[in-house]
Image (tube, rainbow, N blue to C red):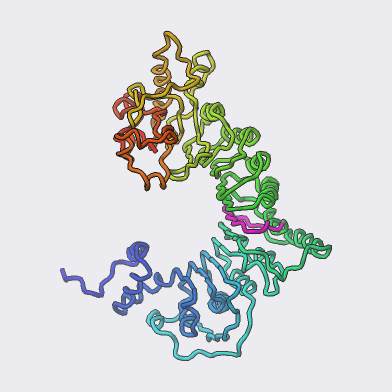
Amino acid sequence: MQPASFSSLPPPEVTILITTYLTQHDLAQCVCVCHRWSTRFIPSLWRTVRADHRFSSEEMTALVARNAHFIRDLELVNNPQVTKVLATLETEREGRGLRSLVASFEPEISLRFPGIVVPRRQVPPQPESSLTPPTRVEVQQGEEFDRVQLLAELMRANQNLKSVSADESYFRYKDGTDAFLLFIASCPSISLERLELRFHNQRSQSTPAADRSTLFRNRSLMLSALAIPIFKALKELVLFGGHRPIDAPRLGFLCRCPNLERIQVNNIGLNSLRALSARLRTNCPHLSRLEFRGHYKGTDEDISSLLAASRSYWKELSLPDMSEFNLISFGVLMQSVETRLEVLKVKGWGRLLGSHFLELLCSAKNLRRLEGPADGEVRLTTKESTMWAYAAFRQHSKGKDRSWALGPSMEYLQIWIDNVPRPDVICRRNGDPMIRISKVPEGPGKEHLRYDVQRWVYTQLGRLTGLQELILGVKKLYTKDLLTRNITSLSSDPIMCLPGDLGRFSYKIAQDTLHQVRGRGLQPLRETGRLVTSVRSR
């Protein structure tokens, strides 16, 4: 058996797997090893390209043109030169093209650049020729291009695009007039699966004020949206809001997205969200996943209209901290909870009470994940998922079935079970005695009722045999408190523990040792945090 030479390479299919773990720098080093390595690794080196200011020279642009047939994932950052070259060359490909396209542009960057002429080639260039740029590049007289038209030309030349992302700079012409309809009409209608629109810039100052002609133009744009082809493969839509509301005609393209399943909304204003909710419910019957990010200060009715945007009910929901979340929104949410909701992530429940969370636990038969705010995101006004244990047990003991509908399919549970001190805890961390919890029905002869409540809570948890992580809520200290005080000193020096901090160290949680909970039927969980128990205390 002969030793492997320095230039030996594994089979091509193995090389493809290896390149997925290599960075662009690693691939560039592999290309420089020898001719065989160059031939094998150049396609992977050019598979993903971020065309920023480094590609503005004539040599680099010509180099991109020579290796354009390798590019699959392209990110355009302030570079109309590369856009123009690729839009010209893509028409010569047969069955190959870009898979994803990300476009962003700074308005203050000039769009004037020398025209670069790349000769047509009948045969793809040899890999070794990709190492050095061509020695001669023809430069025509300076020419001004419109980035919107360039991007539209590039997308029309790549009908196999699966993901497109663009910002406000590509939604307007040079004079400030709206070009969103051109952008949408140029997106591939057959292959596009994900569309990301970032409306985060201010409206152009050259845009005329809203008068009768403007209203007539907007009405024409809404009617023109019907001429856009149907996006049959589009499953995911991502929207980023801005300082101004999104023009209603821009949302007209949703009538051509009948198979949309998932939408992510980021910092959308109140008026825009109202229009979006109505459009989604009317035009997207298969919508089942919503991820809502950012701050939201709308009313309870506005929140309910967003939750009612899915006609087939939600399968996954992720909501921010909403201070006005109340009974109307909760009633709409429960329609999804009782039917098909599997994942629920809420960072703040507004004005809901513990009785509402108990109703959710008793109805969510398909729920797999119930998540709340992460450590460090909890504020004094944050309302977490909280169940009043004594009230639930009292209803259950009086004949009303308050057993949780959660079962073995539950994987992640984050909830604050209130008013249930551990039976073995008689004082706080600083040594102070436990203050008697108000509204606890512990009169004469019922001093052991707390054990009955604990037993009932552990019975509910014992049914969650598939649970992977359990968080029974104790609010974590704010970062600023951790920087100014020492946790160890708080547990040993009562003087350092101020009255305002007492509530943060209360053991009003349901928590047991790993051995006891496993004995109730709960599967062992991974050890997290500083407690060697079956639950993680935040």
How far across and down, in percent of the image, does residue 65 sit?
Answer: 49, 80
Left or right position of 233 against 492: right
Q: Quadrant of residue 225?
A: bottom right
Figure check: 260 above or below 508 = below
* In the image, farthest residue toward the right: 212
- Residue range of the region highlighted in magenta in the rendering: 230-247
Left or right position of 34 against 83: left
Which residue: 50% across, 39% down? Answer: 380
Which residue: 34% across, 26% down? Answer: 517
How far across and down, in percent of the image, does residue 173 sit?
Answer: 68, 72
Quadrant (top left, top right, bottom left, bottom right) of the N terminus: bottom left
How far across and down, in percent of the image, does residue 8 sit?
Answer: 25, 72
Left or right position of 481 against 282: left
Q: Nearer the viewer, residue 184 or 77?
A: 77
Which residue: 58% across, 85% down? Answer: 115
Q: Nearer the viewer, residue 263 or 200?
A: 200
Q: Main structural element of the magenta stretch: helix, strand or loop? A: loop
Which residue: 46% across, 32% down? Answer: 416
Figure check: 522 above or below 241 = above
392 part of magenta stretch: no
* In the image, farthest residue toward the top: 445
